[in-house]
Image: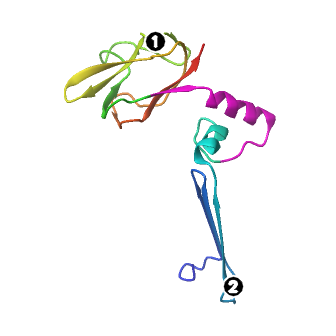
């Protein structure tokens, strides 16, 4: 902190918070740590994954609604495709009604095209992955509001 002339530093990430303060001209340093329940914080934070606590009724309602969404996650590492071919329409878009057997995307792994189904009845709210880009195991691909 001295090297960079910092008197205060704060880091907050996924329910973990560290705050350092350095008293200028004094040798003592104040350290504050706060641990919270990360899953609970993420549910309250809303879709964007920030750890900010909602401070208006509308933000709180959005956070509650977001916590009720079902996340469809990548079952494997591969390349995400929203449509069966480059010149075809996407399988689904935000607002599309799906049922458990609806194919919502393809994940290509080792030259095998794996159809991913919704596995839930509802409405697609968000497409979280980018067409033609790699996805990791467990990465959120879609968020669906159940019916």
The total number of labels drawn is 2
Residue drawn at point x = 80 percent, y = 34 percent: 57
The reply to whether callout 1 and callout 2 are in contact (CB within 8 Å) is no
Name which residue lies at 48% across and 30% down: 128
Q: Position of residue 111 (x, y in %)?
A: 19, 26
Q: Nearer the viewer, residue 60 or 120?
A: 120
The quadrant of the picture occupied by the N terminus is bottom right
The magenta region covers 52-72
Residue 65: in magenta span: yes
Residue 34 is drawn in which quadrant? bottom right
Q: Vertical placement of 32 versus 1: above or below?
A: above
Does dot 1 land on a helix, a strand or a loop?
Answer: loop
Residue drawn at (57%, 41%), measured in percent from left and top? 49
The residue where tag 1 is placed is: 100
> Relative to residue 27, is residue 122 drawn left or right?
left
Specify few, some or many for label 2: CA neighbours under 10 Å numbering under 14, 14-19, or 20 or more.
Answer: few
User: Circle 2 sits in a helix, a strand or a loop, which is it?
Assistant: loop
- What scheme was used to colour the molecule? rainbow
Instruction: Work out whether mark 1 precedes mark 2 in sequence or the reverse, and give the earlier one.
Output: 2
Place of residue 97 in the rendered image (x, y in percent of width and height, measured from the top left): 53, 10
Quadrant for the C terminus in the image: top right
Up-down relation of residue 15 to residue 46 (above or below)? below
Q: Nearer the viewer, residue 24 or 143?
A: 143
Q: Residues within 10 Å of mark 1 (few under 14, many from 20)?
A: few
Q: Quadrant of residue 65?
A: top right
Q: Position of residue 25 (x, y in %)?
A: 69, 89
In the image, which disc is placed on residue 24?
Answer: 2
The question of residue 53 being in magenta is answered with: yes
Q: What percent of the width, then of the height, locates residue 53?
A: 71, 46
């Amino acid at each position: 902190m001295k090297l960079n002339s910092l008197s205060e530093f704060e880091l907050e990430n996924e329910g973990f918070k560290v705050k350092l303060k350095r008293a200028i001209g004094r040798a003592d340093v104040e350290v504050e740590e706060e641990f919270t329940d990360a899953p609970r914080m993420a549910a309250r934070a809303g879709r964007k994954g920030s750890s900010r606590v909602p401070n208006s009724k509308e933000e709180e309602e959005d956070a509650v609604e977001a916590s009720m969404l079902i996340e469809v996650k990548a079952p494997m590492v591969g390349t995400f495709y929203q449509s069966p071919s480059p010149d075809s329409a996407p399988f689904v878009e935000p607002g599309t009604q799906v049922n458990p057997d609806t194919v919502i995307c393809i994940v290509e792994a080792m030259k095998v095209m794996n159809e991913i189904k919704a596995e839930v009845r509802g409405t697609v709210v968000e497409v979280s992955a980018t067409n033609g880009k790699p996805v990791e195991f467990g990465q959120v691909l879609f968020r669906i509001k159940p019916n």
